């Protein structure tokens, strides 16, 4: 965050805002340097950008597209309708501002809010409900006690005697509070959610107050790698440089960079898993986003939990976590062969697990992994596979109560805690349909 500088007209008020510019600038600087915003670089940038534009008289330039470009490093051509990062972060920013002015700075006479339906911040006096008087400016020439022809009674000082709140009103408030507590108790009661080890896994990822980003596979990238027989690492994927090296063809049509920019595909299996995750009781308390792998940026993951679906060939973001994994899912594009490399085989484990076909049955492998996140105290959940059947086996495993419960006991999980782990699963499939997978190896992963 750069140091904020006052503008030359800092003694003047901007129309529609309360207080001179220098007063609002000082308030903004206090908020940005506060403990409430200390661990949230993205929300800090967001608030700084919209407030500075407002104080510079450029409030009309504040919109979702501009915020996405200048705050979240989106390309000028990105589609706000497909990428909800700004809307999601705006909700979090509103909550963070409320937290600051309620707990860290409850006596500030001036507060910042962002009205719903837009992104232009408002500097306004603290409301009476927050313990400070509100100054309501009257239009010039209007008599005291009248506003728009309607009489407005003046508030009498405390010494003149203020009417006390009736006792029955306190009783009514207490009654409603008890009713509300009862409803909350029913809502959060154990009957509505799974209390087994799978609950510990889901509640670890879908933690209240933290955004969860679900990233399905990029099947257009899979097509590109199949046609060029060339793997694309994460750095090339993010820069898009790989699209300049080759222009594969389907029939007479060249698959140029423009073609890939227009075609964003993912598998129905990945979408089904995303919907399945979104219906979990634990997910109801989290803020969930589904993001296309191609428009995702590293900064998006620094303050979020993340769920990645697909092996590294279909979802290059998996490469960010390779240093934590012993089971490394890969794909040989020249031989069209998926395999799992076991970096440090334990006793009884193989060094490599390859896809194979025997008597029409295809043997595939999946990896389910719970890992530390990119930054802060985040977590990552990976559903990887050597092919679609392998990924499905990893996806089905935590939803199988008996199999996953037995595995959870082996790794020391409880109903409330789940250690970081990676589990290797084997499945056989016919015609792409995979029956129940078999756990063949697992490792615990240190934080």
Image (tube, grey):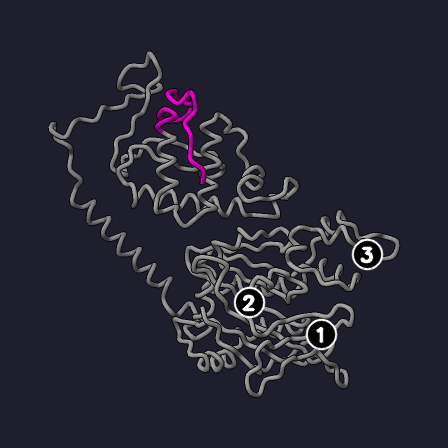
Tell whether 113 sits left or right of 59. Answer: left
Location of residue 33 with respect to 217 vertically, above or below: above
Rendered image: mark on residue 173 = none
Question: In the image, residue 25 lies at what x, y percent?
Answer: 39, 30
Q: In this picture, which residue range is highlighted in magenta?
A: 1-23
Q: Nearer the viewer, mark 2 or mark 1?
A: 2
Which residue lies at the image location 64% right of the left edge and 77% below the top edge? 365
Which residue lies at the image location 44% right of the left edge and 72% below the top edge? 419
Tell me, yes or no, whether the highlighted magenta stretch contains residue 402: no
| Residue 310: quadrant of the picture | bottom right
Which residue lies at the image location 56% right of the left edge and 59% below the top edge? 214
- Quick one: label 2, few (<14), some, or many (20+) residues within 10 Å? few
Closer to the chain start, of discs 3 and 1, is 3
Q: Which residue is mark 2?
A: 323
Callout 3 secondary element: loop
Task: Pick the residue in front: 385 or 270.
Answer: 385
Rounded to the nearest angstrom, the CA distance separating label 2 from label 1 is 31 Å
The quadrant the C terminus occupies is bottom left
| Residue 101: quadrant of the picture | top left
Q: Residue furthest bottom?
A: 348
Question: In the image, residue 236 lies at what x, y percent?
Answer: 68, 55
Task: Pick the residue in front: 127 or 304.
Answer: 304
Q: Which residue is mark 1?
A: 432
Q: Which residue is mark 3?
A: 248
Question: In the image, residue 72 lies at what x, y percent?
Answer: 54, 44
Task: Pick the residue in front: 160 or 435.
Answer: 435
Q: Are marks 2 and 1 in contact (CB under 8 Å)?
A: no
Which residue lies at the image location 62% right of the left edge and 62% below the top edge? 271
Tell whether 385 sits left or right of 220. Answer: left
Callout 2 secondary element: helix
């Amino acid at each position: 965050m750069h140091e904020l500088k006052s503008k030359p007209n800092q003694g003047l008020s901007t129309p529609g805002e309360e207080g001179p510019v220098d007063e609002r600038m000082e308030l903004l600087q206090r908020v940005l340097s506060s403990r409430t915003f200390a661990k949230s670089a993205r929300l800090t940038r967001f608030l700084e950008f919209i407030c500075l534009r407002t104080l510079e008289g450029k409030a009309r330039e504040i919109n979702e597209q501009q915020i996405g470009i200048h705050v979240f490093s989106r390309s000028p051509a990105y589609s706000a309708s497909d990428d909800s990062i700004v809307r999601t972060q705006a909700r979090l920013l509103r909550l963070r501002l409320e937290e600051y002015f309620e707990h860290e700075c409850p006596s500030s006479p001036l507060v910042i809010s962002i009205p719903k339906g837009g992104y232009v911040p408002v500097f306004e006096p603290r409301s009476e409900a927050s313990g400070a008087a509100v100054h309501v400016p009257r239009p010039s020439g209007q008599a005291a006690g009248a506003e728009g022809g309607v009489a407005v009674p003046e508030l009498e000082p405390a010494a003149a005697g203020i009417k006390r709140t009736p006792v029955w009103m306190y009783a009514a408030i207490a009654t409603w509070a008890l009713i509300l507590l009862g409803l909350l108790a029913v809502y959060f009661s154990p009957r509505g959610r799974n209390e087994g080890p799978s609950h510990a896994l889901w509640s670890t990822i879908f933690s209240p107050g933290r955004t969860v980003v679900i990233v399905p596979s990029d099947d257009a990238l899979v097509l590109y790698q199949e046609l060029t027989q060339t793997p694309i690492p994460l750095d090339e994927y993010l820069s898009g440089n790989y699209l300049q090296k080759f222009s594969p063809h389907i029939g007479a049509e060249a698959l140029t960079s423009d073609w890939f920019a227009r075609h964003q595909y993912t598998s129905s299996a990945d979408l089904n898993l995303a919907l399945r995750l979104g219906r979990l009781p634990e997910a109801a308390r989290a803020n969930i986003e589904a993001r296309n792998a191609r428009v995702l940026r590293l900064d998006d993951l620094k303050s979020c939990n993340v769920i990645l679906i697909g092996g590294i060939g279909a979802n290059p973001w998996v490469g960010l976590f390779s240093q934590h994994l012993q089971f490394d899912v890969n794909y040989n594009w020249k031989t069209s062969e998926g395999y799992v490399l076991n970096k440090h085989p334990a006793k009884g484990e193989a060094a490599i697990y390859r896809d194979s076909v025997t008597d029409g049955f295809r043997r595939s492998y999946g990896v389910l992994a719970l890992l530390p996140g990119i930054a802060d105290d985040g977590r990552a959940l990976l559903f990887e596979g050597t092919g679609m059947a392998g990924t499905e086996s990893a996806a089905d495993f935590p939803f199988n109560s008996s199999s996953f419960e037995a595995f959870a006991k082996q790794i020391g999980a409880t109903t409330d805690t789940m250690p970081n782990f990676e589990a290797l699963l084997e499945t056989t499939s016919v015609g792409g349909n995979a029956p129940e997978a078999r756990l063949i190896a697992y490792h615990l992963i240190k934080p």
